[in-house]
Amino acid sequence: MSQEIRNHEVRKTDAEWRDQLSPAEYHVLREAGTEPAFVGEYTDTRTVGVYGCRACGAELFSSTTKFESHCGWPSYYAPLAEDRVEYIQDVSLGMRRVEVRCARCGSHLGHVFEGEGYDTPTDQRYCINSISLTLRPAEGA
């Protein structure tokens, strides 16, 4: 994971984002807020499909990498591809974390943690806000 801020493909003014997103979506996606634990619509979802960025629609995570971490937010052990997300060092709230953003539009998704001991192929937990995502169920799911 390298820290990189890209020139995003999808760029909108603050007013355009506010028009497109609900106040809660705007707070999380554009202001790096966090939705409350255990209330997001995808926390316990087991539907097969792809999770996309709610702001721009970029496909980010697959249900095949989603796992139950009991942390209160949807957890994935990897993005669909490394170029789908960008990583930003986050030292807010008095701790060191790695923020995960959509590489296409720069929207805040959540954080990624390593070395927590989950039985996953990557030993990573992408802790992602449900409100940052839109699930596209697989055909026939």
Image: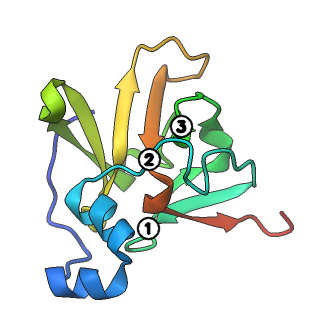
Give the camera-side residue of 95 and 122. 95
The residue lying at 35 percent from left, 85 percent from top is 20
| Placement of 8 over or under 93, stated as above or below | below
Query: SS at mark 1?
Result: loop
Position of residue 87 measured from the top left corner of the image (x, y, whole percent): 24, 42
User: How many residues crowd mark 2 within 10 Å: few (<14), some (14–19), many (20+)?
Assistant: few
Are the residues flagged by discs 2 and 3 in contact, CB closer than 8 Å? Answer: yes
Report, in whole angstroms, how far the alpha carbon at label 1 lies from the one at label 3: 24 Å
Report, in whole angstroms, how far the alpha carbon at label 1 lies from the one at label 2: 24 Å
**Residue 13: in sight, yes or no?**
no
- Report the residue marked by disc 2: 36
Report, in whole angstroms, how far the alpha carbon at label 2 lies from the one at label 3: 8 Å
Quadrant hosting residue 132: bottom left
The residue lying at 51 percent from left, 55 percent from top is 130
Relative to 87, 58 lies left or right: right
The residue lying at 57 percent from left, 22 percent from top is 121
Query: SS at mark 3?
Result: loop
- Amino acid type, label 2: Pro
Relative to 113, 52 lies left or right: right
Quadrant hosting residue 76: top right
Quadrant hosting residue 94: top left
| Placement of 116 over or under 34, stated as above or below | above
- Report the residue marked by disc 1: 58
Dot label at residue 72 = 3
Give the camera-side residue of 12 and 129. 129
The residue lying at 60 percent from left, 46 percent from top is 43
Are the residues flagged by discs 1 and 2 in contact, CB closer than 8 Å? Answer: no
